[in-house]
Amino acid sequence: MKTHTNLSESQDSRLLAYGLEVKELLSMTNTETWTNELWTMFSGYMLAQNELGYSPSISKTFFTFRDLLLFFEKVEIIRNEK
C-alpha cells in the first residue's frame, strides 16, 4: 500500500515538473505568436522538400505539427476561461 502512495507522489511530482516547464515555455510569448511561428517553420520545411528529396517521415512531421497547433488552441481556450 505504501509503495502505491510513493508511486503516486512520484508521478505527481513529475507532472508538476512538466507543468512548470510548459508554463515557462508558454510565458515566453502568446499563443498566436507560437502558432504563427509553427506555420513559418512547417511552411519552410515543406518548401525545402523539393531540394531535400523524399522523406519517409513526412506524415509523422505533419501530424506532429497538427498536434502542436491543437495544443496551442487548447491553451488559448484555457486562458480565455479565466
Image: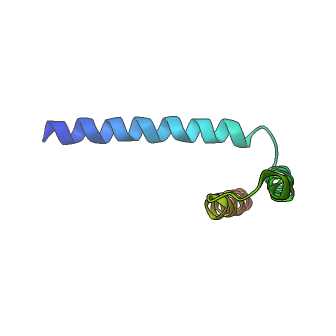
In the rendered structure, the answer to whether residue 44 lies left or right of residue 11 reads right
Percent x, y of residue 58: 67, 60
62 vs 11, nearest the viewer: 62
Question: In terms of depth relative to the viewer, which is nearer, 74 or 52?
Answer: 52
On the image, the x and y values in percent for residue 66 come to 68, 64
Q: Is residue 31 left or right of residue 66?
A: right
Going by the image, does 54 lie left or right of 5? right
For the residue pair 34 and 39, the one nearer the viewer reads as: 39
Q: Quadrant of the C terminus?
A: bottom right
Q: Position of residue 46 (x, y in %)?
A: 81, 59
Q: How many marks?
A: 0
Q: Residue at x 55, y 41 (%)?
A: 19
Q: Can residue 78 be seen by looking at this rendering?
A: no
Residue appearing at x 76%, y 56% in the figure: 53
Above or below, comparing residue 26 to residue 74 in the picture: above
Q: Quadrant of residue 42?
A: bottom right
Asked if residue 68 can be seen in this view, the reply is yes
Residue 35 image offset from top left, x and y in percent: 80, 56
Name the quadrant containing residue 14: top left
